[in-house]
């Protein structure tokens, strides 16, 4: 049986996480907050995105869907390089910041400067921080305050929202 004090302390701890992030505790410089009025550099119609992306990528990037955990080949990607947005090829994460979080999705402890924007996500009866590509507004995943040092952050990304470019390979 769960002790009421443990349940209350856990609930208060979870409720304090967003406040700690807003006060700048436990992380590095954060992305700007996206709003419904945020303008993105790349704007396409749903049909244009559907022509460019696979059905799974469209669902993830444009409808905020999530792939099954442990299904992304990028989980096992260990080479040096850059992870970019699968929608617009904007570099998002360096392989130097990738780590195995055990969650089943590619995880990073720091985004590249100016690469993402954040948005409050209240879906599924919880409050989370959604991450979006700064250039095209594609849904990438979520960021949490339970990652490793030096930032304490865990950018939990959908692998289908990312592409990988090995070091030394230039975009075409």
Image (cartoon, rainbow, N blue to C red):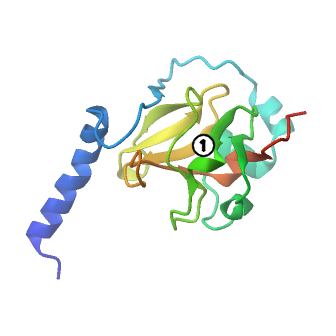
> Which of 92 and 6 lies nearest the eye of the viewer?
92
Look at mark 1 in the image and give the residue it sits on.
140
Give 155 or 57, whichever is nearer the viewer. Answer: 155
Label count reads 1
Residue 129 in the image, given as x and y percentages of width and height: 43, 41
Residue 155 x/y as whole percent = 51, 48
Which residue is located at x 42 percent, y 47 percent? 153
Query: With 135 as the anchor, is 103 left or right in this view?
Result: left
Q: Residue at x 66, y 41 (%)?
A: 61
Question: x and y percent of residue 103 in the render?
Answer: 52, 65
Quarter of the image for residue 3 reads bottom left
* Quadrant in which the C terminus appears: top right
Determine whether 49 is above or below 67 in the image. Answer: above
In depth, the one of 106 and 137 nearer the eye is 106
Q: Residue at x 74, y 36 (%)?
A: 87
Residue plotted at (72% across, 21% down) = 42
Q: Quadrant of the N terminus?
A: bottom left
Residue 76 in the image, given as x and y percentages of width and height = 69, 65
Q: Residue furthest bottom?
A: 1
Element marked by disc 1: strand
Q: Is residue 34 above or below residue 5?
A: above
Residue sitting farthest toward the right:
172
Label 1 Cα neighbours within 10 Å, binned few <14 / some 14-19 / many ≥20? many
Quadrant position of residue 78? bottom right
Q: Quadrant of residue 24?
A: top left
């Amino acid at each position: 049986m769960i002790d009421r004090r443990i349940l209350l302390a856990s609930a208060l701890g979870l409720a304090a996480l967003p406040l700690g992030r807003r006060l700048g505790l436990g992380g590095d410089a954060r992305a700007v907050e996206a709003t419904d009025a945020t303008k993105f550099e790349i704007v396409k119609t749903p049909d244009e995105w559907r022509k460019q992306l696979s059905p799974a990528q469209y669902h993830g990037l444009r409808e905020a869907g999530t792939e099954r955990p442990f299904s992304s080949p990028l989980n096992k990607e260990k080479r040096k390089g850059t992870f970019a947005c699968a929608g617009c090829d904007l570099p998002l994460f360096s392989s130097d910041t990738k780590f195995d979080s055990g969650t089943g999705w590619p995880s990073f402890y720091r985004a590249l400067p100016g690469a993402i924007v954040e948005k409050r996500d209240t879906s599924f009866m919880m409050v989370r921080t959604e991450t979006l590509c700064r250039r095209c507004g594609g849904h990438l995943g979520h960021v949490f305050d339970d990652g490793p040092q030096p930032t304490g952050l865990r950018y939990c990304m959908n692998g289908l929202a990312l592409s990988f470019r090995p070091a030394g390979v230039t975009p075409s």
